Image (tube, rainbow, N blue to C red):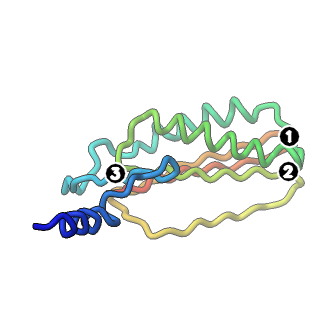
C-alpha cells in the first residue's frame, strides 16, 4: 500500500465515527432488557396516604391565602412529597404529584383526572386539607414504568 492510500483510509475511517463528545453533550445510557413484568415492591396506597397526611398537615397548618405565595408553596409541597415517596424505593414507578391550593370562599370544587390506567400495577393516593383560609387537594399517582 502506498502512503497516500494509508493516509486517505485513515482519514475516512476517522470521519464521523470517532468524534469526541463535548462537555455539553450527555452520554446516553442504554440498559439491557430485564423482561420483568411486575414490580418488586408494589405501590403501597396506605403508606403513601400516611406520608401525604403527615407532610400536608404539617406544612399547611397555619397558612393563609396569598396570591403571590401559593404558587411557590404548591411547588415546594409537591417536591417534598415526591422526595419522601421516592425514599420508599418504589422501583420502576413514575411518581406524579398534583397539588391544588385555593382560597375558601364557600364555593364547591370538582376535580377530574383522566389517564390510561393499568389496574393491576398503577395506583393513586389522595388527601384533602382545609383550614379557615385555604383548601388543598393533593393526589399522588404511582404509574408502573417497565
Q: Are marks 2 and 1 in contact (CB under 8 Å)?
A: yes
The residue closer to the viewer here, 108 or 95, is: 95
| Badge number at residue 104 | 2
Q: Residues within 10 Å of mark 3 (few under 14, many from 20)?
A: few
Give percent across and percent down for residue 83: 54, 37
Give me the C-alpha separation between circle 1 and circle 3. Answer: 50 Å
* Residue 36 coordinates in the image, percent (x, y): 21, 54
* Above/below status of 29 relative to 12: above
Q: Quadrant of the N terminus?
A: bottom left
Q: Position of residue 87 (x, y in %)?
A: 46, 33
- Name which quarter of the figure residue 60 lies in: top right
Residue 26 placed where, x, y %?
45, 51
What residue is rendered at 21% in x and 56% in y? 33
Residue 116: quarter of image = bottom left
Give the camera-side residue of 72 and 4.
4
Q: Earlier in the sequence, mark 1 or mark 3?
A: 3
Residue ID at (29%, 62%)? 14
The mark lying in front, picked from 2 and 3, is 3
Mark-to-mark CA distance, 2 and 1: 7 Å
Structural distance between the alpha carbons of marks 2 and 3: 48 Å
The residue labelled by disc 1 is 132
Q: Which residue bears the numbered disc 3?
A: 29
* On screen, residue 134 above or below 59: below
- Which is more N-terminal, label 1 or label 2? 2
The residue that appears at 72% across and 47% down in the rendered structure is 136
Q: Which structural element holds mark 3?
A: loop
Amino acid at each position: 500500500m502506498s502512503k497516500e492510500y494509508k493516509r486517505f483510509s485513515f482519514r475516512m475511517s476517522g470521519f464521523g465515527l470517532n468524534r469526541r463528545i463535548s462537555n455539553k453533550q450527555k452520554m446516553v445510557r442504554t440498559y439491557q432488557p430485564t423482561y420483568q413484568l411486575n414490580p418488586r415492591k408494589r405501590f403501597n396506597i396506605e403508606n403513601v396516604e400516611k406520608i401525604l397526611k403527615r407532610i400536608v398537615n404539617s406544612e399547611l397548618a397555619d397558612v393563609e391565602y396569598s396570591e403571590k405565595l401559593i404558587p411557590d408553596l404548591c411547588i415546594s409541597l409537591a417536591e417534598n412529597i415526591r422526595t419522601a415517596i421516592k425514599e420508599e424505593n418504589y422501583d420502576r414507578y413514575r411518581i406524579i404529584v398534583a397539588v391544588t391550593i385555593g382560597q375558601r370562599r364557600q364555593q364547591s370544587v370538582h376535580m377530574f383526572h383522566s389517564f390510561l390506567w393499568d389496574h393491576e400495577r398503577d395506583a393513586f393516593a389522595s388527601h384533602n386539607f382545609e383550614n379557615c383560609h385555604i383548601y388543598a387537594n393533593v393526589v399522588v399517582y404511582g404509574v408502573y414504568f417497565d
